[in-house]
Amino acid sequence: MVTSNGTLTADAGAGRITTGPSGRKPRRRLSRRNIIVYGTLIVVALYYLLPLYVMIMTSLKGMPEIRVGNIFAPPLEITFEPWVKAWAEACTGLNCDGLSRGFWNSVRITVPSTIISIAVASVNGYALANWRFKGADLFFTILIVGAFIPYQVMIYPIVIVLREMGVYGTLTGLVIVHTIFGMPILTLLFRNYFAGLPEELFKAARVDGAGFWTIYFKIMLPMSLPIFVVAMILQVTGIWNDFLFGVVFTRPEYYPMTVQLNNIVNSVQGVKEYNVNMAATILTGAVPLVVYFVSGRLFVRGIAAGAVKG
Amino acid sequence: MTALTRGSARPNQWLRNLNAKIASIPMILTAVVIFLGGTMWTVVYSFTSSKLLPRLSFVGLDQYERLWAAPRWIISIQNLAVYGFFSLIFSLVIGFVLAALMDQKIRFENTFRTIMLYPFALSFIVTGLVWQWLLNPQYGIQSIVRSLGWTSFSFDPLYDADIVIYGILIAALWQGTGLVMCLMLAGLRGIDEDIWKAARVDGIPMWKTYVLIIIPMMRGVFITTLVIIASGIVKVYDLVVAQTSGGPGIASEVPAKYVYDYMFLAQNLGQGFAASTMMLVTVAIIIVPWAYLEFGGGRKRG
């Protein structure tokens, strides 16, 4: 109560500087409203946190404890064995070396896909923003509209193209696919960013005789670190979380982590080991979660800019 | 900007801005070959009798007739309609209410926002598996409530064909509302403080200010959010695969899964192409009005 009153007076004081006549609402009602606001938010927050809590608790229990207890109870005896099993021993179809294989596949997919798609899209966005040529806007419009087309419509033609190129089923093929589907949103992101930079910079460089690439590397790149970070967050989380492309365009030995996870959990044979499943789920979610928690505000910017993808 | 090279003695149009054109080759290829070409390719082959391999043997509307006669497709469409309707309404309402609460100059705003948004960072597969576990009738929410004494309590959406789609909806909302909240919050923050002050001076109650003034002012944000949610709805696939694999039976099938299964598992490409063309049509129905609203019908494309 005391603290909420403290907040209120502070707010009212801050408001008075700019408002002049403040609203006619009595303070007491505002305070009751505050309880409702915080109460609702806390209940909502608990709802959002519940699955994470249950995941962690389940992954630390042994199977006998899971069978008798409820999923919300904390483990009586903490065991890390499910984690070890999920990482190194769980069976995914053909092989039984756990998620470790999928993890490294995902790394080998995500790193080059992120770098290549950002490199390509940033140069594209730069060309579109500063070196407009006839017809460029048409291609750009097709690209942006294309981002809304369900992937299912384009999957099979891409299979054929990749097969013709001889990279169907390989990691290279998947990297190409991620680069293609990252292009609309990333190009838009970079185009808007570069278009927002002061034009005088560009003109001055032109007068000094700098060309296309010189301006890009010497002027544009150093000025656009924030947008590169946003693009990186967007791509890393997006590509890591992908399932459809992973399952369509790769062979089982190259399956990314998400596909392996689904195979482990939804395999029909054998006893369901819920603790191993939950440990595997946390392991798969760990990378995007770390990116999310570390990048904080930038993540919000990233999804606001790129929410169209996915 | 483009006029800078005009002084040179080269009249050749193609060589102007050559570097920019070279730099745009990946974009042009993607736009023309994959997005335009790929889409047209699929539409054309949806009129053929392709089975294991794509073949140009036209059969008219046969694939579409078979598609709409297939119970599995009908169920897919019904599921998508139910899922889409509720997911649009709940996302918008919950997202907006949460954003309005977050906009009350509260403390720990960052903490609350972080908690509401973290599911969005997760893969649909992860989300689906977590909720599969929570909704497990033997160990999950149902067993908890029963152990509290209410032994007849029944809540097993993933195992009940009639309500399985709502089980998927719960997981989808858990993952997606945080994003809607963020977009709405950005919209609310973009509204001029003076509007609020004027409404307060006039003695208009808060809820009325929201409904009559703020929401109409946020039209743009609502449209953007709507398009984002809607294009996500049409694509829903991973979540269903992870949570139910389309079951029980075929009760939770969705169009995206129909397409995948026919193209890659049933080796019936024609059906897959026809189904994916129907998805394309659905998206076009969503996108065209949006483009019209956004660009005022002033452009040929968009």
Image: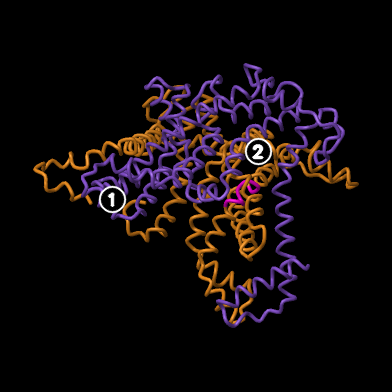
Chain colours: A purple, B orange
The CA distance from mark 2 to mark 1 is 48 Å
| Category of crowding for the residue at label 1, using alpha-carbon neighbours closer than 10 angstroms: few (below 14), some (14–19), many (at least 20) | some
Q: Quadrant of residue B172?
A: top right
Q: Residue A100 in the image: x percent, y percent?
A: 62, 23
| Category of crowding for the residue at label 2, using alpha-carbon neighbours closer than 10 angstroms: few (below 14), some (14–19), many (at least 20) | many
Residue B128 circle label? 2
Q: Residue A265 in the image: x percent, y percent?
A: 68, 28
Q: Which of A252 and B183 lies nearest the eye of the viewer? A: B183
Q: Say whether mark 1 and mark 2 are on the same chain.
A: no
Give the residue furthest to the right: B149
The relative height of residue A19 versus residue A152 in the rendered view (above or below) is: below
Q: Left or right of B268: which side holds B23? A: left
The residue at which mark 1 appears reads as: A202
The relative height of residue B293 versus residue B1 in the rendered view (above or below) is: below
Residue at the spot 63% in from the left edge and 46% down from the top edge: B118
Chain of the residue under label 2: B
Q: Residue B200 in the image: x percent, y percent?
A: 60, 78
The kind of secondary structure the magenta stretch mainly shows is helix
The relative height of residue B89 versus residue A182 in the rendered view (above or below) is: below
Residue at the spot 58% in from the left edge and 70% down from the top edge: B211
Badge 1 amino acid: Phe
Q: Residue B178 in the image: x percent, y percent?
A: 61, 51
Residue at the spot 63% in from the left edge and 36% down from the top edge: A285
Q: Secondary structure at mark 1?
A: helix
Please report the bounds of the magenta region as a residue range.
B173-179
Q: How many marks?
A: 2
Q: Which of A193 and A256 lies nearest the eye of the viewer? A: A193
Residue at the spot 37% in from the left edge and 58% down from the top edge: B295
Residue A79 circle label? none
